[in-house]
Image (cartoon, rainbow, N blue to C red):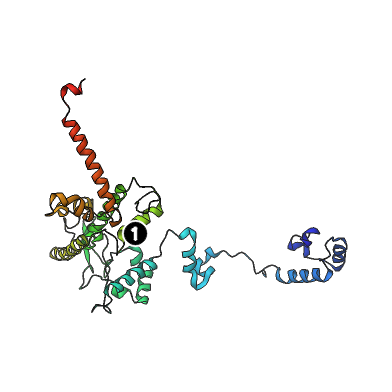
């Protein structure tokens, strides 16, 4: 404020300032904080640090660097990016790969395969990128990724422009778009979406603040609903039986693919709408359950209704059943004469 009161606002105001100028400034200043010695120190400091090319605050265009983030933030540049609000909706492929490897290790812990485990994942473009592959090798993860063996995919022959041509680009690489080898694609994700919709429909009448409510109103509510259903302890979807069923289909698919010399086998898992056709059969839900127990005892669980809302659904079911039977009884008492009077 003292400098502003004598109109010393910019750095350039100190350039070329002589002692006579300082004496005049101090004499006219209303604020006695200003002294000639203080002005001299400011002038000398500015002249020393703010010459062209000598400013510690000069603008640097990091976009010209090979890795702008590394140049700006140093070795921890990935951590800085992860904290950015702009990047909050994205996930680094490294984070994804570490998650896959960590969860695989956890699943095999305590078994004879604890130190010799493998995981399977189809070929995401990010995971098969040469730089990512190199990083996975350095981390010791790449060797645990199940990939084609015994020359599979080393050479792929296909007709192109009327000529049979060889392609080696997929040598040693996992295949992509292969739902017959991925239980979640064939068809557990479909189950999960149906279960999610069912739980949302079953709790539509609850207040939006009710913790039992399943909602798709906001991204946060969608995440909460999905985490409740997918939870390894209290979740209900996909069901254990459906997981086992689709995992076993992978083994059968492998033999069928080998029998057909590595070609796509129609019917194992259609790539166009297969989730709508090859999902679970409604007959699986019924089994040999007595009719009177079907809705309230077994079906609610096997349909994927969350345990926290099953009692609620039973109550609503009983209410609707009473209304239905009441309306049915009233309709049966109607006569042609009473309808048209």
Is the C terminus in the top left, top right, bottom left or bottom right quadrant?
top left
* Residue 36 seen from this side: yes
Can you identify the residue that label 1 sits on?
A: 227
Image: 277 above or below 330 = below
* Residue 66 seen from this side: no
Q: Using the rendered view, name the quadrant where residue 271 is placed.
A: bottom left
Horizontal relation, residue 96 to residue 50: left or right: left
Question: Exactly how many numbered labels are in the figure?
Answer: 1
Give SS at disc 1. helix
Is the N terminus in the top left, top right, bottom left or bottom right quadrant?
bottom right
Residue 116 picture location, percent across and down: 26, 78
Q: Nearer the viewer, residue 168 or 310?
A: 310
Query: At 39% from the left edge and 67% from the top edge, which residue is drawn?
Result: 95
Horizontal relation, residue 293 to residue 16: left or right: left
Image: 190 above or below 74 = above
Residue 106 picture location, percent across and down: 30, 73
Query: At 79% from the left edge and 62% from the top edge, which residue is drawn?
Result: 2
Image: 321 above or below 155 = above
Q: Nearer the viewer, residue 206 or 248?
A: 206
Bin the neighbour count of mark 1 within 10 Å (Cα to Cα): few under 14, some 14-19, many 20 and up: few
Q: Nearer the viewer, residue 9 or 106?
A: 106
Q: Nearer the viewer, residue 93 or 85?
A: 85
Horizontal relation, residue 196 to residue 180: left or right: right
Residue 310 picture location, percent across and down: 27, 53
Residue found at the far top of this picture = 341
Horizontal relation, residue 241 to residue 76: left or right: left
Residue 176 picture location, percent across and down: 27, 62
């Amino acid at each position: 404020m003292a400098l502003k009161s004598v109109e010393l606002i910019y750095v350039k105001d100190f350039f070329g300032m002589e002692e006579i100028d300082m004496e005049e400034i101090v004499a006219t200043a209303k604020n006695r904080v200003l002294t000639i010695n203080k002005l001299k120190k400011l002038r000398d400091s500015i002249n020393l640090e703010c010459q062209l090319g000598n400013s510690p605050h000069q603008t640097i265009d990091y976009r010209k660097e090979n890795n702008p983030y590394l140049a700006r933030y140093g070795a921890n540049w990935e951590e800085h990016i992860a904290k950015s609000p702009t990047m909050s909706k994205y996930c680094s492929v490294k984070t994804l790969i570490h998650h896959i490897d960590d969860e695989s290790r956890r699943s095999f812990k305590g078994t004879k395969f604890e130190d010799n485990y493998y995981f399977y994942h189809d070929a995401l473009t990010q995971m098969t990128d040469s730089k990512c592959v190199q990083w996975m090798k350095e981390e010791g993860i790449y060797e645990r990724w199940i990939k084609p063996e015994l020359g599979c995919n080393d050479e792929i022959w296909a007709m192109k422009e009327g000529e049979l041509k060889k392609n080696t680009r997929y040598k040693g690489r996992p295949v992509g778009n292969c739902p017959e080898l991925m239980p979640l694609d064939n068809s557990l994700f479909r189950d999960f979406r149906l279960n999610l919709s069912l739980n949302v429909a079953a709790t539509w009448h609850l207040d939006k603040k009710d913790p039992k409510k399943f909602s798709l109103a906001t991204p946060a509510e969608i995440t909460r609903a999905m985490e409740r259903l997918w939870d390894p302890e209290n979740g209900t979807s996909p069901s254990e039986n459906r997981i086992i069923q689709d995992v076993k289909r992978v083994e059968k698919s492998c033999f069928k693919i080998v029998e057909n010399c590595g070609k796509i086998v129609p019917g194992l898992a259609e790539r166009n709408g297969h989730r709508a056709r090859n999902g679970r059969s409604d007959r699986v839900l019924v089994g040999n359950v007595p009719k009177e127990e079907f809705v309230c005892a077994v079906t609610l669980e096997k349909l994927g209704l969350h345990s926290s809302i099953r009692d609620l659904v039973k109550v609503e079911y009983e209410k609707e059943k009473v209304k239905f039977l009441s309306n049915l009884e009233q309709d049966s008492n109607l006569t042609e004469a009473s309808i048209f009077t």
